[in-house]
Amino acid sequence: MAERGKFLILGGGIAGLSAAYSLLQKVINPKNITLLESSSRLGGWIQTKRYEDGAIFELGPRGLRPSGPSGRASLQLAYDLGLENDVIAVSSDHVSARNRYIYAHNRMHKLPSGIGGLFRSQSLLSKNLPGILLKETLVPKRKFEHDESIHDFISRRFDSEVADYIIDPMCRGIFAGDIKKLSIKSCLPMVYNLEETSGSIVKGLLFGKSPEIPKEVNSLITKASAEKWSLWTFKRGLTTFVNALEDRLIDSGVSLLKDIHLTSLNVNENREIQVKDDQRDKVFAADHLISCIPSKKLAELLPNKHADLAGFLHNIKAVTVAVVNLEFEGSILEMEGFGYLYPSCESQKVLGVIFDSSTFSEGDRKSSKSTRLTVMMGGNYFEEQFGNPNETSKDHLKNEALVALKNALGIQGEPSKICVSIHQECIPQYNVGHYDLLQSIRQYIARHDLPLSVSGSWYDGVGINDCIYYSQKTVDKILHD
């Protein structure tokens, strides 16, 4: 156990909660940990809406992947919180894992499933995919070290059509962004590194070494590996994670304060970091602060003498996404799978549609058969297509979602339930140069010896797994430096 004074955490999303929990495992006195949240609830973009009839709508993220160090970190956290009996999962041979679609050219196209599927014929591209993949193995390794966009990288190694019709929709489903701006190095580091280590993406996937799984793992990680999980969540939705973390932290004596509206940040002559809430005329002080709030909000708190740091933080942008959750009577889908995505060259309004009932039927209502779907819209085109998020009509978003479902799936009836959410600036955009920008931020903090660390979706990964994993890494670094 380590004791390093008092800690402040800004932001009660999954990153902030994970940082607080990680500190709790290593700090002797839980009363030295304080988390400040600006809203009246914890969890950030994780929000589950539960109905009395058993139906579940995820208004934000809806599932986690178990693979890699970050995937195992989430599984470990769920295990540590005693949630293993609340977990539900789908395996890699489940229909939702095997059937993922792209809607283009006015029809559905099934994406290849697994490495073997890459070499089978497909309908989406005008060229032969196996031929494109074989040709990629002959493309020379890049001779430059600078970052490039995902679109440039994929076009260079594969084909611009692959970039436009496969990678673009897939990245829209994750980042809701423009792959002509998004960084290959920061958004898809594994793909970026395959070229560096193997000279070819295809060769790296086929012949590269599989990452070793630590031998000392808990039963949940072992089960996920043995059953080849593709995706997992909780029986009552992802808010289960948030509630369990909140309860554990409070029961342990950690201070979780909500509705805190900070106005400034300062470091005094004793290197104590202070943040102020003018509304309450209250100052919170600590020996170290972990910021898990949006980078621009942190920038707004900084004093003028750290204008350079504020400038770096302001350079990380984010996009707005509308989420329309719907329930329809009966079984209305003629196809099963995870859902489908749109290439941006064919749909700038709709990002994609998720077949929630097909993936996690446990979230359907209990009384009678129903079908739950989620339509995601906007992203980097939100303002262009729907206007100012503060003024956008939810009825308009609902109608656009219904039109999209009618055109692609032939669904014409009115939903029995509907929930429209507008998540403003919810997904940070790791544009070209993001890696160097992070270096500048962290080097500035180190050079000025600021008792400050940054973590969360704005920096090292936008997914829940990334937020949990890198918050833990952040705490480890603070305590071991």
Image: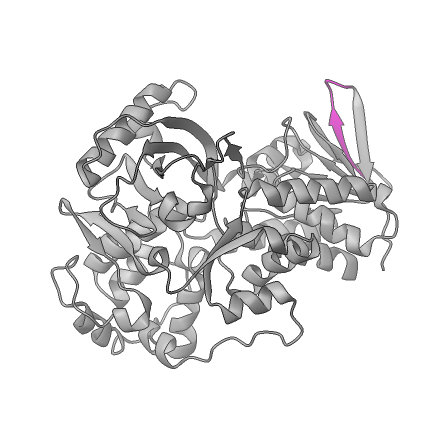
The residue nearer to you, when weighing 388 against 118, is 118
**What scheme was used to colour the molecule?**
one colour
Furthest residue toward front: 367
The picture quadrant where one finds residue 215 is bottom right
Q: Is residue 459 above or below residue 407?
A: below
Q: Which residue is found at the position 61% from the left and 54% from the top?
A: 85
**Residue 25: x %, y % from top left:** 78, 55
Q: Residue at x 70, y 56 (%)?
A: 80
The answer to whether residue 407 is above or below residue 133 is above
Horizontally, is 255 left or right of 59 in the view? right
* Closest to the observer, 248 or 42: 248
Quadrant location of the N terminus?
bottom right
Give how far across and how far down residue 395 sits, in percent: 33, 19
- Residue 276 shown in magenta: yes
- Magenta highlight on residue 242: no
Location of residue 284 with respect to 345 vertically, above or below = above
Q: Position of residue 359 (x, y in %)?
A: 39, 50
Q: Can residue 460 be seen? A: no
Left or right: 355 with respect to 274?
A: left
Asked if residue 395 lies left or right of residue 299, the reply is left
Frontmost residue, 54 versus 347: 54
Main SS of residues in magenta: strand
Q: Residue at x 31, y 42 (%)?
A: 352
Give left or right: position of 207 versus 72: left
Question: In the image, what residue occupies the spot 23% across and 39% down?
Answer: 347
User: From the viewer's perspective, is residue 203 above or below residue 164?
Assistant: below
Give how far across and how far down residue 473 sits, in percent: 66, 58
Residue 232 visible in the current orientation: yes
Q: Which part of the image, by quadrant, shows the C terminus?
A: bottom right
In magenta, the rendered stretch is: 273-280
Picture quarter containing residue 200? bottom left
In the picture, residue 261 is in which quadrant? top right
